[in-house]
Amino acid sequence: MQPEVGPGPESALRFPFPTPPAAGQVLQVAEGILWLRIPLPYQLDHVNVWLIRDGAGWAVIDTGIQTPEAISAWEVLFAGPLRGFLLTRVIVTHYHPDHIGLAGWLCRRFNAPLLTSLSSYMASRATSVARDEGAVTRYFDFYQCHGMTAETAGVVAIMGQDYLRHVAPLPDTFQRLLMPDLLEIGSRSFRVLSCDGHAPEQILLYCDEEKLLFAADQVLEKITPNVSVSSEERDCDPLGHFLRSLRFLRAQIPDDVLVLPGHRRPFYGLHRRCAEFEAHHEERCDRIRRACARRPHSVDELVPLLFERALDPHQMGFAFTETLSHVNRLIRRGEIVSRTEGRRILHVPGPAARPTAG
């Protein structure tokens, strides 16, 4: 995930739990619902993990990444506030390593079933078996054709190969979560929702009776979830999927729910946050549209327009593919088109281009 400052003021949201749980601690956010954090080795340095009382045990939502530090964090919890806890089910919202990385480890430790979407399970399994030298070459060519230098493309392409180090082997079987199923966890009933854009078929759980939304990475405070184009699906429109999912949430879920996200703090203000995301991404599309009206641009040349700070290789990979998601959205809308010059793909105004000022 590429952290970005969100477009709206933080004061627009309400935070019933302003201080997150410290390392090795848990925080109760409702009767039978616990919040804990597992460390990440990135600028966004944590992932939220949620425990829901499930009969004599607890269902866990998301798991953290497979690193020695994350495993150590779990061991501290199991020796401390979670001593004697039985995990009954391991629920994974999507296939990104910070959410699914230790799912297999926890499933084996507690002999617990894995529950997730078909897309999450199959994407993780496919990624785990597909990493090879050919994949590095495909990524390298993908980045280069959109204007990235050979040196940078080589670093970013190789960086994309470390998925296996961060995801423990998954169980051979899983239970599929599919919208609009109902999932019973202890005394609570949850509607299974799925949203796209950040990850295929990302799972959200909504308890209507208590107005609780486990929102995964779809809606976060202060930062926007990364919305990226993959090299395997380079002409896709994940930003369009993401914006459609936001409209779905605003139509289906009331505004007064407590949002329990995959990162940062729980909050109230779902509809406002969704609207802020929509405005934020439209403004970024406008930047790209105006730039391409002045002269042809590659994706690599457009990245600094959306990401003004210096980026390390890890951040560059996310920034590059998120910039391409905005380009693809504008192509779908007919506002820009692509043309090839030599080995580079450049973008110029399309038949539906809007007038630009200045």
Image (cartoon, helix red, strand yellow):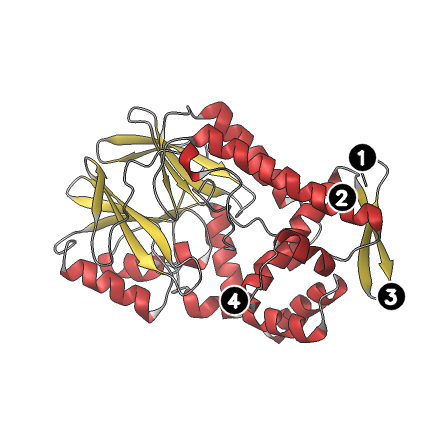
Q: Element under label 2?
A: helix
Q: Quadrant of residue 57?
A: top left
**Residue 99 appears in the figure:** yes
Instruction: Judge depth for marks 1 and 3 and give the one in front.
Output: 1
Q: Please give the residue where the numbered disc 4 appears in the rendered image.
A: 129
Q: Quadrant of residue 336?
A: top right
Look at the numbered discs 3 and 4 and tell me whether their residues touch, using CB distance below 8 Å. no
Disc 4 marks a residue whose amino acid type is Val
Circle nearer the N terminus (4, 2): 4
Instruction: Judge depth for marks 4 and 2 and give the one in front.
Output: 2
Disc 1 marks a residue whose amino acid type is Arg
Mark 3 neighbour density, 10 Å: few (under 14) some (14–19) many (20 or more): few
Q: Is residue 350 left or right of residue 237?
A: right
Q: Element under label 4?
A: helix
Of 347 and 14, nearer the camera is 14
Q: Element under label 3?
A: loop
**How far across and down, in percent of the image, does residue 150 sit?**
71, 74
